[in-house]
């Protein structure tokens, strides 16, 4: 019998009550962090059943969590609106940041500066300076909670995806709204920037994936509709394909023209995050107090299995200029953007 293309590596109780969020460290794909109703942030080595660290400090359920790029720091947002940063080596809280008026439901670290973004049910996106210990921008304009936020690879922009289906592109240097992209018909659930082209993919509960050209800010392709909402996505490292996960499938997409290269049955249900590691795709799912880790062997999935043409996918028109090693100059002082202060 041929080995399975997808299988569950492990399942374990990660918290004493419901798990609300999960993130795999994309640098190593070897660690994972979870947050729960028990107000704890737990860190795990993938493949091992016991937590490396259990980080306490939040006074309300943890609703979003992520690593910094080096996997040395974890930031977690809670139902009370507070954000906390932990130094993983010292296993202690190094920053407590307040400002959101409602549940903090999304968070993302800047790719190389000491900044992070957070989105909240209060409809605001905030940018925080870790060193200055405070909020340096508040971006307003969504009608419902900001369920996704994501920095561009060059660190100059941040995208916010709302439960209102709206996607807003913010210029960090100018501190203002650059463009609002046309709406999804349901909450935005995931945003992924292409690794080396000016292209971004957005996934939604409306069961579609949309591809946007970041030079023209035009919609260039739409994939779907799926049978259920899109839960998580990741581009392959060479940028040739996008992998998207729904409750029961993994799909491999190319675009311009849009085509599905393969569909893999994976019953991961509440998929929370994806990461790539040595030709395998890792997926982390949550169910009540349990976490599941899933593996998809991409060497058995098209177009990787047959070794068929793996061109750039989106064409060569969106080359990203060479990134300098400095973070953008973020305007200081608490400012409103897009919708007033």
Image (cartoon, rainbow, N blue to C red):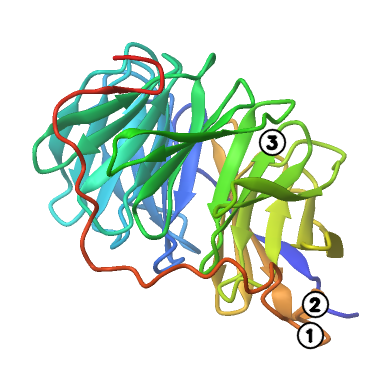
The image quarter in which residue 235 lies: bottom right
Query: Could you say where residue 339 lies in the image, as x and y percent from the top left?
Result: 40, 16
Q: Secondary structure at mark 2?
A: loop
Whether residue 120 is situated above or below residue 72 in the rendered picture: above
- Dot 1 or dot 2: first in sequence order is 2
Left or right of 7? Residue 83 is left
On residue 309, the disc is 1
Q: Is residue 303 above or below residue 202?
A: below
Q: Residue at x 69, y 36 (%)?
A: 204
* Residue bearing mark 2: 303
Residue at the limit of the structure toward the front, as seen here: 216
Q: Which mark is residue 204?
A: 3
| Residue occupying image coordinates x 43% and y 24% | 37
- The residue that appears at 61% across and 20% down in the rendered structure is 164
- Callout 3: SS: strand
Q: Which label's residue is closer to the chain start, 3 or 2?
A: 3
Residue at left 29%, top 42%? 116
Under circle 1, the secondary element is loop
Left or right of 2? Residue 107 is left
Residues under numbered marks 1 and 2 in contact, where contact means CB atoms less than 8 Å apart: yes
- 229 to 251, vertically: above or below: above
What percent of the width, then of the height, locates residue 279?
62, 78
């Amino acid at each position: 019998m041929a080995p399975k293309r997808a299988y569950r590596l492990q399942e374990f109780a990660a918290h004493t009550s419901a798990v609300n969020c999960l993130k795999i460290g994309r640098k190593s794909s070897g660690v994972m962090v979870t947050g729960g109703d028990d107000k704890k942030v737990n860190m795990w080595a993938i493949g091992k059943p016991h937590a490396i660290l259990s980080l306490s400090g939040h006074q309300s359920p943890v609703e979003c969590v992520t690593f910094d790029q080096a996997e040395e720091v974890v930031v977690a947002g809670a139902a009370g609106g507070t954000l906390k940063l932990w130094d993983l080596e010292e296993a202690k809280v190094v920053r407590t940041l307040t400002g959101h008026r409602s549940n903090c439901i999304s968070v993302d670290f800047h790719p190389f500066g000491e900044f992070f973004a957070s989105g909240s049910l209060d409809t605001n996106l905030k940018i925080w300076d870790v060193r200055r210990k405070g909020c340096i921008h508040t971006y307003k304009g969504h009608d419902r909670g900001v369920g996704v936020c994501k920095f561009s690879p060059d660190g100059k922009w941040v995208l916010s995806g709302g439960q209102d289906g709206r996607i807003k592109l913010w210029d960090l240097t100018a501190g203002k709204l650059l463009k609002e992209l046309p709406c999804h018909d349901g909450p935005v659930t995931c945003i992924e920037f292409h690794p080396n082209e000016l292209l971004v993919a957005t996934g939604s509960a409306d069961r579609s994936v949309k591809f946007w050209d970041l030079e023209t800010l035009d919609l260039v392709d739409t994939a779907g509709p799926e049978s259920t909402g899109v839960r998580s996505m990741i581009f392959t490292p060479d940028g040739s394909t996008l992998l998207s996960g729904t409750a029961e499938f993994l799909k491999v997409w190319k675009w311009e023209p849009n085509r599905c290269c393969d569909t893999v049955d994976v019953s991961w249900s509440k998929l929370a995050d994806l990461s790539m590691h040595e030709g395998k795709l890792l997926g982390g799912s949550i169910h009540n107090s349990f976490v599941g880790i899933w593996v998809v062997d991409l060497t058995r999935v098209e177009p990787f299995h047959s070794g068929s043409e793996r061109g750039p996918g989106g064409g060569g028109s969106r080359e990203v200029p060479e990134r300098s090693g400095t973070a953008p100059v973020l305007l200081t002082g608490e400012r409103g953007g897009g919708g007033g202060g």
